[in-house]
Amino acid sequence: MAVLLALGAILGGVFGSASSYAKSAIVYDKAACEQIALEHVHFLEHQLPWMSAFIPYPCPEDEAFEVRHIDAKFYFESDLKSSYYKYRVEIRLQTSAGRKTYEIDVHTKTGYATVHDVKVRSV
């Protein structure tokens, strides 16, 4: 029993320290990450014509983009000071041709955005 308590205290300290380092390193807050994700999807839809090859969408209006969900994810690194958070932003695009749902990950330290997933549903 004492071993389990000691192990729990050690792991709690390690994860607590990593989380503390990650929180103190946040440069882009939730609102900024949402805006970055919207700009990323806007770029994909308007500037990269091959993205429309998935489904023949008309060029959407800016108000067609809807933020559906934002979730913070903690990423633990072996170097505790390198641990970080990412926001996963779900953005839905609805047009007369159908619906695309993007999941965009935004790194809170760098603001770097990546596409995690794209789901397409045609009408």
Image: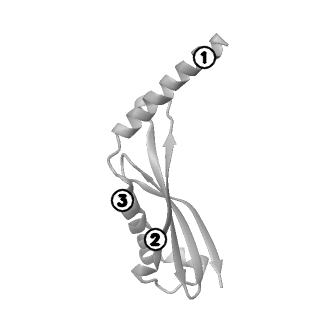
**Of the numbered discs in the image, which one, if any, rests on residue 38?**
none
Q: Residue furthest top?
A: 2
- SS at mark 3 in the image: helix
- SS at mark 2 in the image: helix
Q: Where does label 2 land, which residue?
A: 44
Q: Who is closer to the viewer here, 2 or 86?
A: 2
Quarter in which the C terminus is drawn: bottom right
Q: Where does label 3 land, which residue?
A: 31
Of badges 1 and 2, the one in the foreground is 1
Q: Position of residue 70 (x, y in %)?
A: 48, 58
The CA span between labels 1 and 2 is 50 Å
Q: Position of residue 110 (x, y in %)?
A: 36, 48
Residue drawn at the location 62% of the way across and 74% of the way down = 120
Residue drawn at the location 45% of the way across and 36% of the way down = 83
Q: Who is closer to the viewer here, 50 or 92?
A: 92
Of badges 2 and 3, the one in the foreground is 3
Q: Where does label 1 land, which residue?
A: 5
Mark 1 vs mark 2: which is more N-terminal?
1
**On the picture, is 115 further left or further right than 108?**
right
Residue drawn at the location 49% of the way across and 33% of the way down = 77
Specify the amino acid type for callout 2.
Leu
Mark 1 vs mark 3: which is more N-terminal?
1
The CA span between labels 1 and 3 is 39 Å
Q: Quadrant of residue 79?
A: top left
